[in-house]
Amino acid sequence: MKNELAKEPRAAVRITLMAHQGLNSRVIELFSSLGIHSMAVESARCVRQMMKNRFWGLPGLRAEFSDTATDIFRTTIPSEAAEYVLCKIIEDLGLRTPGRGAVYAQNLHEISCREFPEIAVGKVNADMLLSDLSLITGIQSKSGSGENLFRVALKLGAGVPVVGIGIGSGIRDRLGLLRITISPEKELVYLMVPSHDADGLQSLLIEEGHLNRPGGGFLYQAPVRAGMVDPLIRIGRQEHAASIEQIIAAIDDLKKNTAWRKRFFGLESGAQNLATADLSHREISFFCHDGQGDNFVRAAMRAGAGGATVSRVRALHLKSEEKERSVPCEHGIFCISAAIEKQVMQTLRETAEASPDQEWILQSMAAASVFAHKRS
Amino acid sequence: MPERIHMPFRVALAMIWNYVKVKVSEQVKAVAFIIFYLVAFKIIVLNTAPDNILQISAGVGLVVFGLTFFLEGLFLGLMPLGERVGVQLPQRSTIYMIVVFGLLLGLGSTLAEPAISALRLAGITATPWETPLLFRMLEVETDNLILAIGGGVGVAVAFGMVRFYFGIGIKPFIYTLVPLLVGVSAMFSRDENLANILNLAWDTGGVTTGPVTVPLVLALGIGVSRSASRQESTTSGFGIIALASLFPVMGVLALGAWLNPSTPLPVTASVFFSQENRASALKLVSSERELQNIAFQRGNEAARRAFFANELNYETALKDLADPEKRHKFLGRQSLDEWLRQRASSSERALVAIELSGKPKSGKIEKNQVPELLKNESKSAVRAIVPLVLLLLFVLLVILRDKPRKTDEVVLGILFALVGMAMLTSGIRLGLAPLGDQVGRPLPQVFRSETHEEGRIILEPFDPGTVLTAFSQNGVPGRFFYLRDRSGVPNPVPFEPSRFDRQTRRYEHIVERPPLFGPELTMVGIALVFLFAFGMGYGSTVAEPALSALGTTVEELTVGTVQRVGVVRTVSLGVGIGLLAGVARILYHIPMIWLLAPAYLVLLVLTWFSEDDFASIAWDSGGVTTGPITVPLVLAMGLGVGGELKVVDGFGIVAMASVFPIMTMLVYGIIVQMRQRQILQADGEGSHEE
């Protein structure tokens, strides 16, 4: 039975919920009431601009960065339940109030030994969801030379960046012991933006974040099926009854889209010098037990992947003999060209099947506009 | 695996250079504050230039490189190794195995890291007559003391692991242990003998967890809690070090309670050394010879007179002191100058000075001790690191049948840690400790209102005819003569007829150093001592490697919500305040319990308001503060100030330096929490569930 499931990639939807850490126990309650019993939890932080008065009562405000502990929950559910689950999450956790979190769904193909949760889809008002979003994922060396992507994102007012950490591998691992001179620590910056502005914002991010320099980092977009953003970019001192972010959120809500706030014109023609083509790439993820990650990374690199970023997550199992079993796991991301997807997935699957436990998951989803510095 | 890339030599060199540059400059920044502070204090306040600049600079350089290597070694080798073991233990073995392993690790780390030597140094002035129990524990029952401390750490590590395994918070432990310890201490403080070991007991808590144990235990705890925790809390993994600073206190207190009935009560020195008391004195001291040493090294004139009983023996012994051959028989490792300055009475000084003047002045035989020092420190580095690593490797390879994730990195890391540790400790011995000594010992000068005897000069032959008369404003005559100082400038110095010996035509001149701030300004002096204590506590803690490891781990686990810099600064601030309190305790003779009990009470209240995660980080930071850099500096200052005020021992400062960081960290945590919560509470809904 298990091996049957493992054979073929199945279409499904990944729900990613980035919630304030204080909501943690409510998220778990909600998920188990929805019938979702296993999820991967990653610790991250959410960065916002904090507006403060200047010292000694000087006029004007100064902006600082304020970090909020955030948990990223990832779970996979059947395609048809996506909108229902999203709406339930938004309603139950009050995500329409700025500052509590963001949630989105992405279509993907999964290879795993588990069964998807059975969710009794009820009737919800799916109107509240925004459907024209893109996810920009940036991976940057923590100690690298580039300007921090999340700072740039905040300065540009692009959205609220959620930052996770991971360990990068790639060329570094092929240097022998000389590798210790390069810090493997990476920051993963997740940023949800309106899709019609995604390309424009991406090129701004690349430029201002100095990603176009050696060692600057890596960045790509992935389409989002539907979701809800957290518009609370600025906190602290505020001089009006509603902040501009709250007004934007309200208009988004009324218009049911974000197209009205398009800010880049004439960019969608592909005039940029990015080497992109729509959905030419795939984002491959794997989840496996702590310690197995290296095998997966090695396998993928054998098959042609350039490098990987591995983060530590906890797999939570709510329905098991012991209640709330938590297993240390690793979550790795590769971004590869669609052309080699087959062979990478094949090698990964072979590695996974050889691993001692059955708790691995392989996922593949569309990605676009991959940017990395190229030696010229 | 794809082919290995071979970097051209020049590129590789550039990469290494870059890496070294970044890492070294980090440590330079960490160490800079304390060095500048000490030197500035020396030059501006004490008004003297640092001696031995070359040696000290070399030592400081060694400290910087040592820290760099050591920390890199921790992050590359020791911590990944510890974490690997921690992750695998709960998965592949039983809870009993984990407990045994915890016990062994705790005990082993105490035996390996010579924390006990720091305690003995602090107790160097403890005497068997004033504080018999303290003396007995430090000098006679040393093995039992080590065992009590090691046992405490072992139990703590074991409990810590059990805690992670079953997902119990740190708070229940704190709420039971702290009131128990404080209560027992309060009870002990009413007993003549037991009161004196309180300081020792509370100091052990801070001293036991050294720079190797802390990161290792931290990594281990994180590993165990990652793979065993039920509740989905992210930053758990902390808290073992907190327990490891509480349980040893209990161990020492218990040992004290056990030894107390068989220990004589405090008596005066002359009674203790009298012949009638000899039998009971020999219970504390192994031999007559040892007793004699103590009379010289720790006693005063009365003690020595009582020891020798008859005048003749006493004087012969004093005369023997002048003989460098026989000297160490009495003084041990103490130098004669030191003894004369600290222990001798003025009549004894005179006697020895006369005897000395008859002997040819032995030129300072200062052999080059550096290679010897390096050898010793390397040995102790090996002792501190290798057994623990072997224990971990044994458990990992043999019992868990696993191997480190990146073997080459781990091996390199362990090598780095070894080299770094040896360099660090030798650097401290060569540079930082002497510098601290140069500032800490003369520190009492700044608050003392009397003049201070610096040394004696024998003028022979002395012509009384050269003595002149000078009159004061109201006509009182006084006699003086001219003496050339070192630079050859003649200075008038007062003539004291009693110091002139007519028969030998010998005049003994006492070189005095006037009080730094004049006789009335002692308040300024005391303020300066406080300032010094605070700055030194802050500066030395910033450079502490264990704290750096803790900070990095916290930053990593909280994904940057709590930053390393924030942790390091908050803890250092706490240590600064703690040293302030410790010095105040010595200056104003405040009983330890009056400081400890309220401080811990405040901690309990603050803990109540903190989240469990942050509470364990905060309580952990109490244990990491006192490491190889802080301890020698703090002790130099404690002994300097304490010795001046004739305080029995230099204990208590370290205990203070571990209480206050907990307090500052808890407050910091509550502030961070409140900020985080603000956003959630914006819609009037407190959604924090306990």
Image: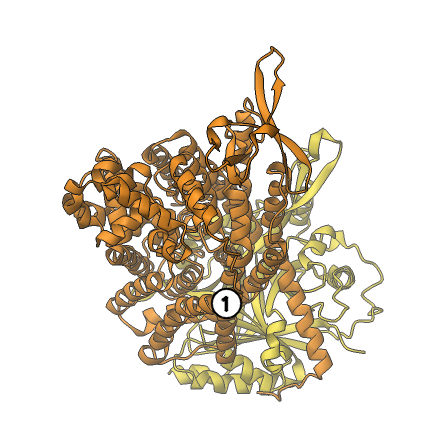
Q: Label 1 is placed on what type of residue?
A: Leu
Against B326, is A94 above or below?
above
Which chain identifier belongs to the orange chain?
Answer: B
Say which quarter of the image contains residue B593. top left
B414 relative to A257 in the view: left or right? left
Residue B309: horizontal and vertical position, in percent? 22, 41
Q: Is residue B77 visible?
A: yes
Residue B560: horizontal and vertical position, in percent? 56, 55
Residue B210: horizontal and vertical position, in percent? 42, 58
Q: Toward the viewer: B657 or B314? A: B314
Q: Which residue is mark 1?
A: B374
Against B408, is B625 above or below?
above
Residue A2: horizontal and vertical position, in percent? 39, 82
Which chain is indicated by disc 1?
B
Q: Toward the viewer: B464 or B439? A: B464
Q: Is residue B70 visible?
A: no
Q: How is the image coloured?
A: by chain
Q: Could you tell me which residue is drawn at 27 percent across and 56 percent down?
A: B142
Q: Could you tell me which residue is drawn at 60 percent across and 44 percent down?
A: B37
Judge the density around disc 1: few (<14), some (14-19), many (≥20) Cα neighbours within 10 Å.
some
Q: Could you tell me which residue is drawn at 33 percent across and 80 percent down?
A: B398
Chain A rendering hue: yellow
Say which quarter of the image contains residue B594. top left
